[in-house]
Image: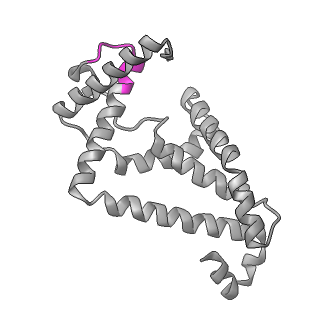
Amino acid sequence: MASQLKEYFPILDNRFLFSVVDGSIRLFIFLGYIFSISKIKDIRRIFEYHGAEHKVVFTYEAREKLSVQNARKYSTLHPRCGTSFLMVVMLTSAFIYAFIPFDSFSLKLLSRVVLIPLIAGLSYEIIRLAATRESSVLNWITLPGLWLQKVTTKEPSDDQLEIAIRALDETIILENAEGQLAVI
């Protein structure tokens, strides 16, 4: 789509501007999809479970007893959420792709596939570091992901919190049995 816009806006011959427009289009499609599905009743219920998951993870990270009462007080927005990760991936990829010097479709596609591990790893580190530092530039990068979580997480019912607690309890049992539980 950005390539078609290039025909009408010659300024998009600039590789960096083209990448910004291309990334913006991809981001707009992604956000449109998320906002659209959020209107579906069954998806809203999934987003309530997503909120329950975050509240229970916060309770666990605070080293509090996993209970509905303890979990209820926490936010549904979590700094290391997969939603935030996807948003950071999209922003990071738009930035990195701006520096790819290829004009042919084949080379661009190949470079994008080859760069997936780099972009994913860099995005993961951005999310991880932003979660450990109260005020940093990284927090600004992850802020759009937290905003998007206002769509992808909803306030859960107590029943949903109980299910999230049970899921985490079972995970802890399995991880302890395998000796792999990371203490946060």
Left or right relative to 62: residue 71: left
47 up-or-down from 53: above or below: below
18 up-or-down from 161: above or below: below
Please name whichever residue, 101 or 177, is drawn nearer the observer in this view of the structure: 177
Residue 154 can be seen in this image: no
Please name whichever residue, 29 or 171, is drawn nearer the observer in this view of the structure: 171
Left or right relative to 143: residue 73: left
Which residue reaches farthest bottom? 8
- Highlighted range, magenta: 57-66
**In magenta stretch: residue 65:** yes
> Where's residue 122, x and y in %?
67, 41
Identify the residue at image location x=59%, y=49%: 89
> Where's residue 117, x and y in %?
67, 44
Residue 10 can be seen in this image: yes
Q: How many marks?
A: 0
Identify the residue at image location x=39%, y=38%: 77
Identify the residue at image location x=69%, y=66%: 19
> Where's residue 97, x and y in %?
72, 59
Quadrant position of residue 26: bottom right
> Where's residue 103, x and y in %?
79, 72
Left or right relative to 96: residue 23: left
Which residue reaches farthest right? 101
- Specify the quadrant that holds the N terminus: bottom right
Identify the residue at image location x=57%, y=47%: 88
107 up-or-down from 65: above or below: below
